[in-house]
Image: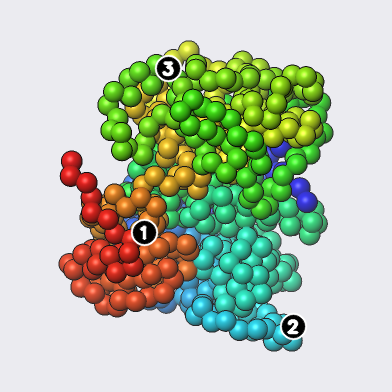
Amino acid sequence: MNYCASPWSFHRRPTREVTVGDPSRGGVVMGGIHPVVRQSMLTCDTMNTAECVRQTLELVAVGCQIVRITAPTVKDAANLENIVRELRAVGCHVPIVADIHFKPEAAMEAVKWVEKVRINPGNYADSKKFVIKEYTDVAYTAELLRIEERFTPLVIEAKRLDRALRIGTNHGSLSDRIMNRYGDSPLGMVESALEFARICRKHDFHNFVFSMKSSNPKVMIECYRLLAARLEQEGPDWNYPLHLGVTEAGEGEDGRIKSAIGIGSLLCDGIGDTIRVSLTEDSPREIAVCNDLLAQIPRLTESKVSGTTLGVPWDPFVYRRRESAIASLGNTSCGGESVVRVVVTRATHDKVAPLISPKSDVKPEGVHEDLNLLELDPRSPLAPETIGCDTQLVTVQDGIGLPPIQAFRLLAVRLHELGRRNPILLKDCLSFEPVPLTPEVALLRAAVNLGALLADGIGDAILVRGESGAGQSLRLAYNILQAAGCRSFKTDYVACPSCGRTLFNLQTVTARIKARTDHLKGVKIAIMGCIVNGPGEMADADFGYVGGAPNKINLYVGKKPVKFNIPEVEAVERLVDLIKEHGKWVEPEAP
């Protein structure tokens, strides 16, 4: 199966066009030859019409092209009429998307008023009770017929009113039926979406897009690759546009890095027609990151590997780290079973080394200029005598005119051709800009280039040079490894970006939880505003802090709720108590 036209050069995935609203009056067209569309979501109560209008206008002012609003109940869905009417009255014609979970009745109300409806196959007409049950083929078919009966009215109404749909599956919120047959897997996500797509197609309705979201960038990449490949297998008229996003990415640098790894790597392979960067911050900041990220893709894909039809020797749909021998970095080693190491330049080392505590987890593990490093040009096959032995550390030489993603993929293929297991040092850039990059751009470029390769399983050490600040470049390298799931040097947070369903102030609570727990290396904590993003979508978190009711919090261990209706004023300390009960707590060191 092929998920893209070529892993060596940029070719945008060809798709049919999907219209959201009237393009002559502010609507957008996704897919085809149209630019990637930027979108975001409101964070306020859907019943607060004035605030919904204010936030929508604020988003449009910074370049948002589609605005999503949650509609958890029929009452909320009905108020979309008022929101849309007031927006149109002030001359704002941005398409509005209703976000639906659990209630088909809310979708049937919302489709009357908005240009697009998003449904989640995991909970639209299916159950999610984490029930283990064996489904016979007969029982499974009966469930599909029940789902078709519940979903078909929305499809027919969307077709009649010329609306668009988004079939959006989320890792961790698959139905029990899908979970029992496919597991909580990329395959399960894809098959769940295809079931709903077949119902749309049965009624000759094609104005829909897919999404495959996860808070884990590697899982997200695998899902979209598998979906793109499966759509190609289904036939040329299954070329529907794709909506990209890393859900619950969090805030600050971590949220931007996770989003850049997942969204950016797929865009570089030509996959993606609309994007949403999910940050636990004010929504307009998401659009700024969308703009910066989209601006980097042409720069990161401008050169091509000419004349090659090489395949890749790894499975692009299932993550597996490339096997390598062990090489010395001086005081430590890389390759083999070692974690991916962090290498710095001599200039960076000399600036940061005197400031680092001996106990610090963030420290240089090799100095570039001191390494026994062989730099190679992979554009042509390597001669067997070029590399002395498998323990020789190798990298791509600077200035060969290829983007880092294609260059290092090609290096891995050339080594495979020789049967070599040499460890590879990845670089975030192979040439330098005449003017230093801004920190925002340096972060995104490094995260896309290094993250895409790490998601392919390539890389035993990394070197960040695009960020000119010494301390910032070191920290950025470690944050990329954490976001890519290659190392854990600090607490990992999965935080949803807030919406009208949220039952507490996510930004404030996230800051409060981080203040108490950000020293817990290797612990993963999910902070979810409501039960929709709670037990399912926090996926593999160790502990969860979930809004259960207004001013009430439920606490989870994994996906299991263990404490209910805790007053919000007590909930952070009760979370700390829960972490202690499970032996994951350590006292923070005195500053």
Between marks 3 and 1, how big is the CA–CA gap? 36 Å
Identify the disc placed on residue 346.
3
Between marks 1 and 2, how big is the CA–CA gap? 38 Å
- Which comes sooner in the sequence, label 2 or label 3? 2
Give neighbour class at mark 2: few <14, some 14-19, many 20+ (Cα, 10 Å).
few
Q: Secondary structure at mark 3?
A: helix
Q: Quadrant of residue 534?
A: bottom left
Q: Which residue was labeled with disc 1? A: 525
Q: Quadrant of residue 61?
A: top left
Front one among 562 and 53: 562
Seen at 42% across and 68% down, the residue is: 558
Q: Amino acid at mark 3?
A: Arg
Which is in the foreground here, disc 3 or disc 1?
3
Q: Secondary structure at mark 2?
A: helix
x and y, in percent, of residue 190 in the image: 65, 62
Identify the disc placed on residue 137.
2
Residue 409 lies, with reference to residue 286, above or below; the image says: above
